[in-house]
Amino acid sequence: MPPFEGSVLPCFWRAFPELVVSQMSFQEFASVCAEVEGESAKREKVKVISAYLGRLGSDDLETATRLFLGTLLPKGKRLCVIYSAVIRAAAMIARVEPHELEELVRRYGDVGEAVEQLLETRTSAVPLLSGSTLSFSLLRSAWEAMASDSGPGSGGRRVRILAGLLSSCSPREARYLIRSLGGEMRIGVSEGMLEEAIALALGLELETVRRAHTAMADLAKLVALAKAGALPLEVQPMQPFKVMLAEPAGSASEISSARPLWIVEDKYDGIRAQLHKLGRRVAIFSRSAEDMSDRFPHLVEQASVLPDVVLDGELVSEEGGRLRFFNLQRISRSSSHGLRYAVFDVLYLEQRPLRALPLVQRKEVLRNLSLAFPPAFFAVPYGTASGADEIQEYFQQALARGNEGIVAKDPQSYYELGARGKSWMKLKQVFDTIDAVVIGAEWGHGKRRGLLSNYVFAIWCGERLCPIGKAYSGLTDAELKEYTKLLLENSTGESHGMVLLKPFMVVEVGFQSIQRSSAYESGFALRFPRIMRVRQDKGVDEADDLEKVRMIYESQAGR
Ligand code: AMP
């Protein structure tokens, strides 16, 4: 046990006693970082890193690669160390008041550099622990401990662990240790440069490493496997891959001119997700390979009935449409419950890689598989279209279904990992928007029977509100249900089947273009209007006026 006074540090060492003896030192990693940071030529940086990586064994290679990428934890796992905890821990070790350190941070613009300077100049800092340098294994354990600790008192425990780590750091190590907490090393190294360094270090072709990186989106894991002679080159269950992407198209005719026949499907406005199942294990990864499994427990549970499989698709709302008001960061276990998984591709099924099959055949496999899908899963419906008119028609239908456009896919294409090419092309509705006041609403039909689902909205013409359009698409059934109640509470009567409303609700209305029209009092009408959202943050007075509409109309001429 290192002999020094001060209450926090000894308990840190007690937590990891067996790990004080190290294999690979963080000190060496830090001096490589310093060399790379001081080097401006990209080729030289790559050389320095590859020489270093070449000396490491499998585990340390994984740790070092992760650290170069800026974090020690696997993708998707977050370390909740807040700025103030770093400041408190570093100030404790440097024996200064936190505000003195914060002053330095302001001066250097970087916490790591500020702490390095402070430790270098403060003779009263807690002395380095004799004979022990920070090892990769200790660092890994400390990070794991910090990442898995939550609940009461966890903030204080993290500060103590950090202080413990810093107490065994040289000032230079502290600089990079602290940067790794911020998720960025700031030494001018990109993923592409790391790929080059790995290829050089392991004697592999750069193309081979790049290809492997698309099949396994976690570079640190990849390098460990490569060192063990098992470079992953194909999609495997439980191993996140880089998803295929679509090239944007400006019009249906641009798509049709690229090839004569297309598979067309709705473009859902949700969250891209790859779902992997192997034996009893299920994992859901984001587009950038983050593990999101624990945010979607109902999907993980329902996937247990599937065979071993790798699927690609989009997480969508309960009705199978747009995912509104959500973003990935805000989705919690409970709010995710209504989500469904719209599956549009299958890349692996029961030990068979399917990536190289033409899309039409993968769609056939998916159709068969979908017969046994659990309730929250569905195979994305699709059609075929040839020529601009058919593509445009499918596009209009997709918008009418409340989706944001279409993705057209070459029926003969294989699944290209990580590629944005002309095999998939997306066509989205280009929306201008105005904020308008809802002044009336009509009852829906069919599925929307009993719901006020067709909103009439108006803009300010001087002191008066004058109607400019009507929209029945955009809002989900759940939202319509909620707003029907609210609208009825604000009704002032009914006229010609329309519930009249006192002005209280502002909606953001998206549309493709504005036309002159005598149908509405404003003198304008919107083409393909769609309610984007209710502007709860805006009062009726803040809705847009005729002037704004005129400006948009005039700006269209220039497009
Ligand atoms: P964007 O985010 O506008 O670049 O569009 C690409 C995204 O559309 C993809 O990453 C998917 O998340 C999403 N998407 C929605 N529906 C589909 C679909 N049917 N096929 C492929 N991608 C889709």
Image (cartoon, rainbow, N blue to C red):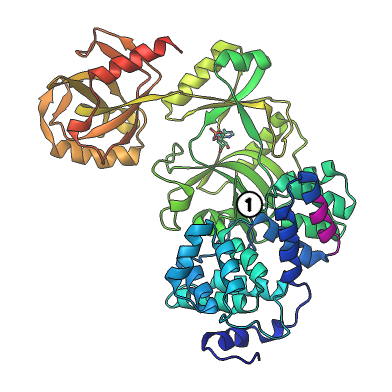
Q: Main secondary structure of the magenta part?
A: helix
> For the point 75% across and 78% down, which residue is it?
22
Furthest residue in direction right, as rendered: 203
Q: Position of residue 505 (x, y in %)?
A: 21, 35
Q: Quadrant of residue 58?
A: bottom right
Lateral position of residue 307 relative to residue 28, left or right: left
Let me know if residue 10 is in the magenta part. no
Label 1: element kind = loop
* On screen, residue 534 above or below 179: above
Let me know if residue 49 is in the magenta part. yes
Q: Position of residue 389 (x, y in %)?
A: 54, 11
The range drawn in magenta is 46-55
Lateral position of residue 236 relative to residue 6, left or right: right
Neighbor class of circle 1 (other Cα within 10 Å; few <14, some 14-19, many 20+) is some
Residue for badge 1: 306
> For the point 60% across and 90% down, which residue is it?
4
* On screen, residue 10 above or below 485: below
Nearest the camera: 368 or 404?
404
Q: Position of residue 376 (x, y in %)?
A: 50, 47
Whether residue 462 is visible here, answered yes or no, is yes
Whether residue 443 is visible here, answered yes or no, is no
* On screen, residue 66 above or below 151: above
> For the point 61% across and 88% down, which residue is it?
14
Q: Position of residue 314 (x, y in %)?
A: 54, 41
